Image (cartoon, rainbow, N blue to C red):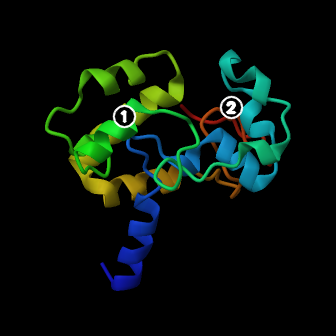
Amino acid sequence: MMSGEKDKMEDKAIDLAYCGIYCPECSFKVAYETQRNEHVLDMPEKYDSFKNADLVNYKCSGCKHENTCGDCKIKDCAISHNLEHCGECNDFPCEIILNFSNDGILHHKKAIDNLYYVRINGIEGFLRKIDKQLKCDCGERLSWYLKKCIECGKVREE
């Protein structure tokens, strides 16, 4: 891998949260960056209060840049063990990450699946795989809960 390509991968790797959530796939983040709230409309009921919020309220830089989600046991644990993400831990999957991934929220389940993928294929393999999933064939950006492409209407495969 060439130096510029490696730097680009490292820049993207910081978007893999400690828990395994991949920030560029976040419905809130994509809604903010594209200024299209359609990305949040199909999110679980738990997020109803955000569905009609001003898009500026969705701005989040990710937990490795700032702590916008409040207290986080996963982040605190990973930092205390000097880990880039929970998938690097000898105790993975621990009770903390298992509880998080099994709380019934789809993107939390994806987080632990992401970490397993990273453990097996490395961060570079994960980033190559996920980059292909972040855009529709028409080029429109996709997010966690978007059921069909905003631009072309193509139903998203699960």
Relative image position of residue 18 (x, y in whole percent):
38, 43
* Residue that protrudes farthest toward the bottom in the picture: 3
Q: What residue type is labelled 1?
A: Ile
5 up-or-down from 53: above or below? below
Q: Nearer the viewer, residue 81 or 30?
A: 81
Q: Residue at x 53, y 31 (%)?
A: 158
Residue 19 visible to an observer of this rendering:
no
Q: Which residue is drawn at 79% across and 29% down?
A: 51
100 up-or-down from 14: above or below? above
Tags 2 and 1 touching, CB below 8 Å: no
| Helix, strand or loop under label 1 | helix
Disc 1 target residue: 74
Relative image position of residue 108 (x, y in whole percent):
47, 28
| Helix, strand or loop under label 2 | loop
Disc 2 target residue: 147
Q: Which amino acid does label 2 sit on?
A: Lys
Q: Which residue is drawn at 40% across and 24% down?
A: 101
If you read the primary sequence from the N terminus, does the residue marked by circle 2 or circle 1 appear first?
1
Relative image position of residue 65 (x, y in whole percent):
51, 56
Relative image position of residue 9 (x, y in whole percent):
40, 68
Q: Which of 158 and 23 is in front in this view?
A: 23
Q: Residue 47 carries which label?
A: none
Q: Which residue is drawn at 13% across and 38% down?
A: 90
Residue 48 shown left or right of residue 76 in the figure: right
Residue 32 visible to an observer of this rendering:
yes
Residue 77 in which image quadrant: top left
Q: Nearer the viewer, residue 66 or 96?
A: 66
Give neighbour class at mark 2: few <14, some 14-19, many 20+ (Cα, 10 Å). some
